[in-house]
Amino acid sequence: MQFKQAIYTSLLSLFSLSIWAEAPLIIYSHRHYEADEALYVAFTEETGIPVQVLKAGANELMERLKAEGASSKADLFITSDAGRLGEAKALGLLAPIHSEILSTKVPQAFQDPEGTWFGFSMRARVFVYAPERVDASTLSTYEALADKQWRGRILCRSSNNIYNQSLLASIISADGKKEALSWATDVRKNMARPPQGSDRDQIRAVAAGLGDLAIVNTYYVGLMLNSPDPKDREIAQKVKIFFPNQSGRGTHVNISGGGILATSTQKENAQKFLEFMVSDFVQKSFPLNTFEYPVVRNIAWSDLQKSWGTFKTDPLNLAKLYEYGQQAVLLFNMAGWE
Ligand SMILES: [Fe+2]
């Protein structure tokens, strides 16, 4: 249903952009932020290249690309997780990109070592907690959430979510498979309720007192604080953010990024789009509109992000998220984390 609606929307945008002489750049995107529409418009204004976007889940988009095969009209694949980009690469869907701009502006950890995908925004998977029930001085690492003191207090979404799979992949990489399994088993035991809902739902549950601490991406707090819904704004004001593993490897981060499809007939224009995504204009827009972090150095954060504080990021090359992601799915199943 959502998929059909997305096709309808993109057909409409194709129609409205048909005045452009150039063939539209066709983007399959898993990103779901309204603010992205303004970036597409800005790209077309700057380059004269019209854009047609099909929005759906990463799995749906990959299934569609597989089904379309060589006859696919899509030029770019954009996701909100490096694990999915790694999967697209493994499926042979992505073409190598040779761009000085991308390879120098995007930090090494946020680009595929073989150059098939590049990150353009960063997100951190952190703790959100109720300050009246959690003493911040007791917070330290992801690993410490396995401790018995957290029994019945933790909130997190289900393991079929890619953000959790990537988090566990980073823990496998740091601590090994055995430790990662016992971590997932113990954290599952410590949950206040069976895993369910979205990251926003975990924040709501902390504010409602259903649990004391949730594992979520930072930008959801930003989106809720700036929501048109006053209830969400009130809820988000009740919680605080903690960046785990600051005295060790750093907080687990992920990227939203993209790659050029192997079947694209407009690879040059597709590359221009990815380069546009790391331009100062776009990089400055992420902290203000989606509350994601920029990937390019020396781009100012929003005041809200500054208020959360600076933090050390796990330096793991995010290509590893796909490598360990499949193990992560198995470990979640073994741990009983639904
Ligand atoms: Fe998200």
Image: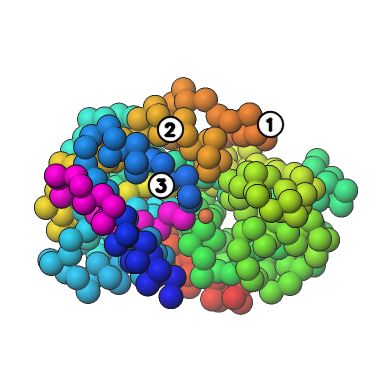
Q: Which residue is mark 3?
A: 37
Q: Does the beta carbon of the residue at mark 2 sit less than 8 Å from ligand 1?
A: no
Tell me the kind of residue under disc 2: Gln
Q: Which residue is mark 1?
A: 307
* Residue 214 location (% of width, % of height): 70, 57
Is residue 17 or residue 191 the one in the foreground? 17
Residue at (73% x, 59% y) in the render: 204
Q: CA distance from mark 2 to mark 1?
A: 19 Å
Decide: few, some or many residues near mark 2? Use Cα within 10 Å; few <14, some 14-19, many ≥20.
many
Residue at (26% x, 57% y) in the render: 15
Q: Which residues are magenta?
A: 14-32
Tell me the kind of residue under disc 1: Ser
Name which of mark 3 and mark 2 comes first in the sequence. 3
Residue 150 shows in the view: no
Question: SS of the residue at dot 3?
Answer: helix
* Residue 277 location (% of width, % of height): 35, 38
Q: Is residue 237 above or below residue 15?
A: above
Q: Which residue is mark 2?
A: 283
Residue at (19% x, 70% y) in the render: 68
Tell me the mark number nearer the camera, choosing from 3 and 1.
3
